Image (cartoon, rainbow, N blue to C red):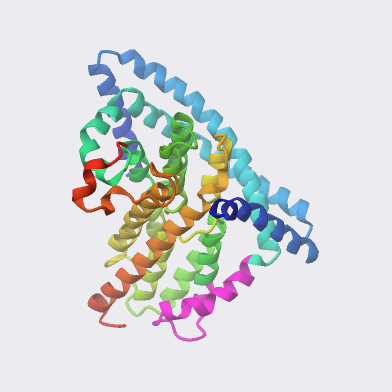
């Protein structure tokens, strides 16, 4: 799909510039943008280095596990189909906490682990379970407190206050999370005939 | 007040993390360097993707197609206050984080990080997820083929996230300043005085 979008952007650009009578504009744009992309990529190295370094400290200090332990009881009512004491809820908590802190790279391994543990509870191996859907939906609504990448991009672009987007971004993902949870509850009753 | 909370959140969190780590006897500098090396390696891998997306969005914009598109869609998008410049971001965000980073960084450079478009793009990037990537990765990892309503539900999350981003960006930095009401919330009789976007 990215392939199609990428090709479509370029092709419409070339065709439009050509019909507008300045095909040479396409040539200069391609090489100018490549140079700009390179400098943006170089800035990105600094950003990710800083962020990965800090998140490794946070992980080593046990911040992730501590917060995840606090999160678990809050998650319980959202996953009524997971039996009490099952390990999957812990992995879900770790994944969502990592997302909350903007540690996307740390979140993925826990997410995969959570999926494997949820699959153990699955009686029809090729079909999703209600708990999996709730987990995926919360994950894609991306509940985050720290949009680290967006802040870093703003910082390198010279924003007066790079972190000013924290509050609106956190609120927006909070609204999206509530929306998917409500929709999920509604759909779950109709598709799985359960609470 | 709200600005102060936002401004203090990141330094506060970094400071707190560092303090806890030091108290717990972690070799903070060494761990930072190890993590930073991983991060730098990842960024180098991502670089070609960023260059690729810069070329695509640049051509799309410089050819004049984007402004044409903006003209055509303006009557439909204006009631929502959505600038057409962020459309490429909306389309590419669910598929690729590297591409979305490229689009946002390009928007910030072109329109300025403190412009409405720049702010909106950053909020949208910060409050959305690479939905299709996550879905294929997580469902594929356990061999699930029947996903029932998982895909539409996750897409709903994206759409609500974008609308909420738009609303909150308007609320925080919109035409009327803080707490201005986005035009689509107004009864139609008041739409006569809507600000031009």
- Magenta span has A83? yes
Residue B161 vs residue B142, the one in the foreground: B161
Q: Looking at the picture, does residue B94 appear above or below residue B43?
A: below
Q: Viewer-proximal residue, B19 or B49?
A: B19
Image check: B22 left or right of B1? right
Give x and y (percent) for residue A155: 58, 39
Instruction: Tell whether position A110 is magenta.
Output: no
Q: Is residue A9 above or below residue A104?
A: above
- Would you say B113 lies left or right of A19 here? right
Please report the residue visible at 35 percent of the width from the left and 36 percent of the height from the top: B85
The picture quadrant where one finds residue A118 is bottom left
Q: Main secondary structure of the magenta part?
A: helix
Residue farthest bottom in this picture:
A84
What is the total number of numbered labels drawn onto the structure image? 0
Which of the two residues, A169 or B180, is positioned nearer the viewer here? B180
Quadrant of the image for the C terminus of chain B? top left
Specify whether B46 is left or right of B35: left
- Whether residue A161 is situated above or below residue B28 in the rendered picture: above
Residue B71, position in %: x, y? 24, 31
Residue A82 % position (x, y): 43, 81
- Looking at the rendered image, the quarter that the N terminus of chain B falls into is bottom right
Q: Is residue A88 above or below residue B129?
A: below
Please provide percent x and percent y for residue B35. Answer: 67, 51
- Residue at the extreme left of the image, as rendered: B189
Task: Report the magenta residues as a range.
Answer: A64-91
Quarter of the rendering containing residue A188:
bottom left
Residue A194 can be seen in this image: yes
Residue at screen point 55% across, 37% down: A159
Tell me which residue sits at (47%, 53%) in the image. A169
């Amino acid at each position: 799909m990215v392939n199609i979008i990428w090709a479509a952007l370029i092709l419409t650009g070339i065709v439009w510039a050509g019909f507008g009578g300045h095909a040479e504009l396409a040539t200069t744009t391609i090489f100018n943008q490549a140079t700009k992309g390179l400098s943006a990529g170089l800035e990105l190295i600094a950003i990710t280095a800083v962020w990965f370094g800090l998140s490794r400290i946070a992980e080593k200090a046990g911040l992730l596990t501590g917060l995840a332990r606090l999160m678990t009881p809050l998650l319980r009512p959202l996953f009524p189909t997971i039996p009490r004491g099952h390990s999957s809820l812990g992995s879900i908590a770790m994944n969502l906490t990592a997302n909350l802190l903007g540690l996307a790279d740390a979140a993925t391994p826990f997410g995969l682990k959570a999926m494997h543990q949820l699959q153990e509870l699955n009686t029809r191996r090729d079909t999703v379970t209600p708990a999996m859907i709730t987990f995926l939906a919360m994950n894609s609504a991306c509940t985050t407190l720290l949009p680290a990448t967006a802040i870093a991009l703003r910082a390198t672009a010279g924003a007066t206050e790079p972190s000013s987007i924290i509050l609106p971004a956190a609120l927006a993902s909070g609204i999206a999370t509530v929306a998917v949870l409500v929709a999920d509850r509604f759909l779950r009753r109709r598709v799985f005939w359960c609470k | 007040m709200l600005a102060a909370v936002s401004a203090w959140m990141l330094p506060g969190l970094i400071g707190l993390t560092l303090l806890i780590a030091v108290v717990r006897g972690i070799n903070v500098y060494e761990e930072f360097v190890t993590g930073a090396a991983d991060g730098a390696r990842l960024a180098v891998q991502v670089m070609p993707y960023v260059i690729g997306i810069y070329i695509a969005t640049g051509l799309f914009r410089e050819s004049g197609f984007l402004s044409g598109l903006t003209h055509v869609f303006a009557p439909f998008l204006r009631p929502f206050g959505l600038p057409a410049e962020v459309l490429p971001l909306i389309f590419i965000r669910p598929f690729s984080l590297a591409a979305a980073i490229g689009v946002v960084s390009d928007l910030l450079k072109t329109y300025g990080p403190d412009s409405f478009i720049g702010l909106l793009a950053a909020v949208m990037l910060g409050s959305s997820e690479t939905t299709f990537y996550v879905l294929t990765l997580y469902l594929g990892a356990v061999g699930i083929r029947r996903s029932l309503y998982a895909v539409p539900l996750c897409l709903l999350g994206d759409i609500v996230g974008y609308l909420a981003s738009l609303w909150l960006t308007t609320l925080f930095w919109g035409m009327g300043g803080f707490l201005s009401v986005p035009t689509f919330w107004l009864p139609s009789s008041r739409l006569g005085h809507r600000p031009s976007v």
